[in-house]
Amino acid sequence: MSKLFITACSTATRADVATARLGNRFGRMDLASQLALLTVEPLAEQLRAIPGHRIAIVLAARVGSLPTDVEYWKGRHAVGGLSPTLFTYTLPSAAIGEIAIRHGLTGPNLCFVGDSKDVLSEAVELLQTDAADGCVCVYTHVVSPDLTAMISLPETAQAGAIFLQRNGPGLMELGENRRDMESLCANLRAPKLTK
């Protein structure tokens, strides 16, 4: 088994979206896609070092696209009906497409609905089987006020991303016990580890 390294890490919250400027498409995206793009943007330098067809994307959307689905369905009573622009984001994997378009990534991709525990194991598999030379690992967790009322989860909007590759050194070597993206991003972004 070859060593794998986390070479970049980033997180974002709803507050970061308000000040972000990432082109014309950004404002039309659902919140999960906006957050995913914001977390990947600081990884751009590492992404440019590898050909786009050799970079994979693995994403976990904790509640899938439910916040966007609820918003889309509310539009059935609006003047003009349901929004075709919003419809695009009623798939949990929409954020993968936005990341791929922005950064020119055409390697393998995979989307999980649920927690982020499988993201790193899938990324490791892609790298160890030589399906990719680097992997953008992303999690999103968005619960809108409308969704909160329906499923009794607290409102939240956060995302995190790491770039995993064979070459080091990086922020840290990926150990066997690192399987939860949310905890990993929180630990890497802690002030004590920041340079």
Image (tube, helix red, strand yellow):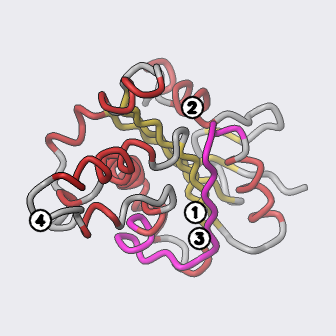
Circle nearer the viewer, 1 or 4: 4
Residue 28, position in %: x, y?
A: 20, 60
Alpha-carbon span between mark 4 and mark 3: 40 Å
Alpha-carbon span between mark 1 and mark 3: 7 Å
Tell me the SS state at disc 3: strand
Magenta residues span 98-117
Residue 141 is one of the magenta-drawn residues: no
Residue 44, position in %: x, y?
A: 40, 61
Answer whether labels 1 and 3 touch (C-beta < 8 Å).
yes
Residue 144 location, quadrant = top left
Front-most of 48 and 126?
126
Alpha-carbon span between mark 1 and mark 4: 35 Å
Dot placed on the residue nearer the N-terminal end, 4 or 3: 3
Identified at 47% across, 60% down, the residue is 91
Q: Which residue is mark 4?
A: 80
Which mark identifies residue 182? 2
Tell me the SS state at disc 1: strand
Residue 89, position in %: x, y?
A: 37, 60
